[in-house]
Each structure stands twice: as C-alpha cells, then as structure tokens.
Image: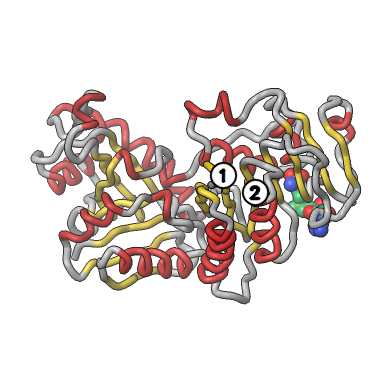
C-alpha cells in the first residue's frame, strides 16, 4: 500500500499525524495513520494510491508545522541480504525512474543515530552503482523547472537488513537529510537557545532576501532576552537591539555597544519610535497571550517582522493548541485589513515549542 512517510521530532508523532490527516482532508485526500511512539516517524497510508503523489506536490511542506521531511513510498520495505545490499536495492528500484539525488536516512532515535554510520558507508557504493545505471541522473536547472521537476530518492534504513525506499520532489521537500539542519553552536553565545533563532532565520528568510531583511543597521527588539542567545544572533548580524527581560544579560553582549537592556515586562514594553524591523520573542509565557501580543505589534506598526516561539503545553492536544493560536493571529490580521505572511514550524532546535514567523506585506 502506498504511504506518505513523514519525519518529525520523536514524541510529536501524534501531532504530525493529526496535522497530515487534517490538511490532506482539506485537499480531499484521505487515508489512515500508522505510527510508533517516540520514533519520529508517521506513515499516512492512502486509500487511493495515486493521491500520494498528488498530495506531495500540492500541499507545500512549508505549510506543515510538525513534519520535517516527507516522501512517498516505493513499494514495501525491502529485506536486505548480508552481502550485496547495493544490488538488492538497485533491483528493487529497477531502472525506469531517474532521480536528482540520493538521500540515505535513518530515524532520529538513538538506534537510528547508531545506524547512520552504516548508512553513510553504504551510500558511497550505492550512489556509484545508481549513477552507472543512470538511476541517479541529475537534471539541468532548465529541465528541473519543467513539468514535475526534479525528484529525490530516499532510502530510509531501519536496520542493516531493512530499508524503505521512496521519493520526494526537490522543490517541495527539505534540503536537509531527514529535514535536520546541522548548525554549529557559536562559543561566544551566552546560551544554547541561540541555535533556535539561527535556524529560524535560515528556514524562514530566503537566502536571496537576507541581505535586505536581515541586515546590519536594522533595529530589533528581543522580548524575554536573558541571558542573550537570541540577542547574540541579532548583534552578530549588525543590528541594534533592545533586549527586554528582568533577568541579567551577558556582559559580552552589553560590551558590543549594540544592546540596550530594559528590565521590564515584555507584555508592556513598546519602542518610542516606529523604526523596529525585527521583533523576536522567546518568553516562557502562555502561547495565546504571546500570539496576540505579536499580532498587536504588527497591527500597531511597531515592527515589520516577528519571529517568536509558542510554548506547547504537554497536557493539551498540541496540534490543536498551535492551530488555535495561529487562527487568532489570522483573525486579528484580517480584522485590521493587513496583508501578511505567516508560517509556523516545529524546528529541529525547538523542543516544547513551535517557531512562528509573521511578516507584514501591505496595509490597506
Ligand atoms: C527561554 S528564556 C530566553 C532565552 C533567550 N532567548 C536566550 O537565547 O538566551 C525565557 C526568558 O523569558 C523571560 N520572561 C518570561 N516572561 C517574561 C515577561 N513577561 N517579560 C519579560 N521577560 C519574560 C524570562 O525571564 C527568561 O529569561
């Protein structure tokens, strides 16, 4: 049976499953879920096989909050022999389809991590073999833009003896294996949280727009800033930052001369001038209060873009909670005739939170 396989953070399978089921149904695609808890993997089995391909083209992966990556299965799990695994995989694939690239993947679990070395080793002869038989045959840029576009081949290893093969569209999948970007922790940052904002900027702001939207000389406000991991990301991009938190900020950041510390309540703080581009917020506070606060900054013209975390409550249905908070923001935007862009993602460096990016496009 054909399924769409989705990767998510282990422990969030239920959220990922609820989301794909609902968003597929909006596209009139229906199926059932199979998942194992804490494996970071969800299978959405389609009642009509051909709908898997339709959905994975039509529904932007960027519109899914909890899925990091996805692919459509090619057949059942392939049982591999002790030797000649490459030949067994090649045989299962046949030579009719052509792929842009090969993604050798494992689960984001301890067992999966232990297996990833094996995967990396096997990927070398596998890639060579598939290139020789033209199963891996990268398209030119021009060809990629035509028709269905380039397709990636996924090989998800559950063990040395079992692999699930599948495909995704390059234009509608994550560029990272298993949807996981590997960022280097900057030693000068006062906290590990810094990686969350770094990943968010890379994920939500397209490369070609970073020079104008994330640039030196801009003004930014950081709510819930202490000790300064997020402020560090703004400072390192040359911005002038108002950091709001009752807690202390790292001395190293204060010494840059780019940071002003306000020991105030983040719900009450507002800048005097309307010259703030970025509002970022990592306050550990009720998510619906934060959502409304962010929307009000945009409505009042106090920032142009906001990047913030909505903290998830484990006792609640976390998917429903996020959808409710997002809907509240959308309602405020439409009540105020604001044309906006909004995306939310459970990023790799997020834990019990999702990151939201809200950006004003025009006001009517
Ligand atoms: C997760 S920490 C922020 C970490 C920070 N982003 C970093 O990278 O170092 C949450 C912070 O929110 C602050 N906070 C919580 N509620 C707040 C409020 N109402 N006003 C201002 N700060 C608040 C806390 O004092 C705490 O320092």
Q: Which mark is residue 298?
A: 2
Residue at 56% x, 44% y is 360
Under tag 1, what secondary structure?
strand
Q: Residues within 10 Å of mark 1 (few under 14, many from 20)?
A: some
The N terminus appears in which quarter of the rendering?
bottom left
The picture quadrant where one finds residue 36 is bottom left
Q: Compared to 264, does 152 lie above or below?
A: above
Residue at 30% x, 39% y is 170
Under tag 2, what secondary structure?
helix
Q: Which mark is residue 78?
A: none
Residue at the far bottom in the pictured view: 315
* In-front residue for pair 253/306: 306
Counting residues from the start of the chain, the first of labels 2 and 1 encountered is: 2
| Residue labelled with disc 1 | 360
* In-front residue for pair 80/66: 66
Q: Is residue 163 visible?
A: no
């Amino acid at each position: 049976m054909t399924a769409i396989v989705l990767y998510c953070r282990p422990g969030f399978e239920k959220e990922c499953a609820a989301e794909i089921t609902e968003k597929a149904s909006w596209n009139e695609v229906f199926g059932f879920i199979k998942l194992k808890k804490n494996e970071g993997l969800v299978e959405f089995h389609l009642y009509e096989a051909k709908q898997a391909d339709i959905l994975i083209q039509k529904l932007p992966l960027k519109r899914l909050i909890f899925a990091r990556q996805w692919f459509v299965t090619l057949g059942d799990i392939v049982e591999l022999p002790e030797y000649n695994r490459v030949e067994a995989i090649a045989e299962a694939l046949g030579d009719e389809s052509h792929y842009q690239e090969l993604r050798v993947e494992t689960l984001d679990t301890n067992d999966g991590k232990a297996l990833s070395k094996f995967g990396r080793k096997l990927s070398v002869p596998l890639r060579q073999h598939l290139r020789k038989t033209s199963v891996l045959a990268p398209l030119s840029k021009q060809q990629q833009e035509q028709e269905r576009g380039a397709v990636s081949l996924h090989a998800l290893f559950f063990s040395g003896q079992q692999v699930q093969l599948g495909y995704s569209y390059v234009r509608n999948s994550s560029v990272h294996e298993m949807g996981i970007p590997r960022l280097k922790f900057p030693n000068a940052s006062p906290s590990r949280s810094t990686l969350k904002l770094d990943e968010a900027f890379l994920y939500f702001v397209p490369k070609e727009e970073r020079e104008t939207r994330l640039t030196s000389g801009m003004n930014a406000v950081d709510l819930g800033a202490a000790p300064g991991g997020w402020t560090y990301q703004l400072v390192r991009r040359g911005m002038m930052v108002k950091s709001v938190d009752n807690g202390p900020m790292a001395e190293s950041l204060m010494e840059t001369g780019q940071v002003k510390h306000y020991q105030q309540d983040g719900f009450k703080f507002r800048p005097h001038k309307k010259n703030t581009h970025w509002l970022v917020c990592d306050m550990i506070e009720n998510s619906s209060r934060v959502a409304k606060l962010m929307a009000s900054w945009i409505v009042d013209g106090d920032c142009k873009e906001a990047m913030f975390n909505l903290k998830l409550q484990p006792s609640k249905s976390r998917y429903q909670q996020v959808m409710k908070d997002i809907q509240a923001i959308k309602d405020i935007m439409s009540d105020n005739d604001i044309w906006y862009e909004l995306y939310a993602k459970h990023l790799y460096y997020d834990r019990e939170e999702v990151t939201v990016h809200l950006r004003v496009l025009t006001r009517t």
